Every structure is written in C-alpha cells, then in structure tokens.
Amino acid sequence: MRGLFAAAVIAASVAAAPAISAAPVVVTSGSFASGDSIGQVGSYGVGPGRYRFTFATDAPVDLFVGEVINTRTTNIFCNEGSGPFYCGGDDVPLMPSLDPAGPGRWAALIEVMPFTITPGGGFIDRYETSDSCCGYDFAFEALGAGSYVLSVGGVPEPASWALMLAGFAATGAALRMRRRPGPALA
C-alpha cells in the first residue's frame, strides 16, 4: 500500500512540474586561425522563460566582448470614448553582457517575459507588453587556432527545483518506511 502511495506521489510530482528545458541548443559555432578577428551578430528566438546563453572557445582569445539582446516593447492604447486606439509606446533593449564564467567561457542570464495586458486608467485604456528575444553579438581576437560555440539552455524556475526536492524527499520517506522482513523462525 505504501509503495502505491510513493508511486502516486512521484507521478503527481512529474505531472505537476513545469517543463524544464532540454539540454543546451547550439545557436552558432565556427572555427578560427591564430590572429583572426572574429565578430558575429545574429538572432535566435525563444519563448517566455529564463535562459542561459553560453559562449565557449577551445583556444585562448583576447579582447572578448559579447551581449544578448532582449527588446521589451510596451504599446499604449488610449480611449476617447469611441474605442481604443494606439497612442504610443516604447522599445527598451535589455542587453546583459556575456561575462566571464571560467577559462574560455562567458555566460549571460536572461528572462523573457510573457505577453501581458495591464488595464490603464482614465484616458489610457491598456498597456500591452511583450519581449522579442534574442539577438546576440560577440567579437574577439584569436591568440591561437580553435573553435567557438554559442549555446542557449533553459534555467529551471525555483518552483521546479522545490517540486523535484519534494519528490525526492517523498520517495526517500516511502523507501525508509517499507517493512523489512523479520528474522526467520526456526
């Protein structure tokens, strides 16, 4: 009976857990010779969530600079009584740098917000906010021949970690509570 309870807890934990992104995906990669100046600009689309962009090289580089670009757009809709109409907005680029994360590695965390509609007041009918993610750029000087890769992977939300730990605790408790066979009587 307790084994059935443990199985039910594990099944509920898996079903209720938010999706955790799979392994990192390669956005771009390439190779370089000693003395090359490398620079690249591009884009890669992701949905709402938290992401880690990682740039790695297998040879020493100098003067590395890089960033990930997420543009947060807010559109404002007004209403003079005849129905809502677009009356302004703003695009704000959010550009976290790819910061050193170890030898030959740089990383940036970025959060992409879901589309939201916020009611306004008075003349303003509503605000609509969305993110357009992600652009990237990087540049460096190669000190030797090698290759590079820029990848992106999802970062689990804290609730996912908590749910996973609760599932492990429940499984451990269920295993500890199992009856052990007593000594055989002769």
Image (tube, grey):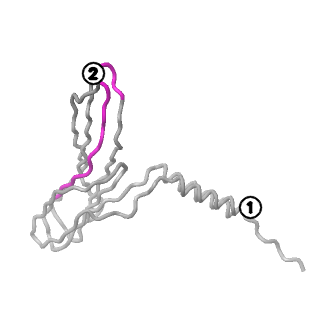
167, 15: nearer the viewer: 15
Residue bearing mark 1: 1
Residue bearing mark 2: 82
Assign a secondary structure to mark 1: loop
What x and y, as percent, mark residue 180? 76, 69
Magenta-drawn stretch contains 120 = yes
Magenta residues, as a range?
119-138
Residue at 60% x, 57% y is 169
What x and y, as percent, mark residue 74? 26, 35
* Left or right, residue 165 beside residue 86: right
* Left or right, residue 39 beside residue 124: left
* Left or right, residue 65 beside residue 179: left
Residue 185, compared with residue 176, is above or below; it is below
Measured Cα–Cα span from mark 2 to mark 1: 65 Å
The mark total stands at: 2
- Name the amino acid type tagged 1: Met
What x and y, as percent, mark residue 30? 19, 69
182, 51: nearer the viewer: 51
Whichever of callouts 2 and 1 sits on the residue coming sooner in the sequence is 1
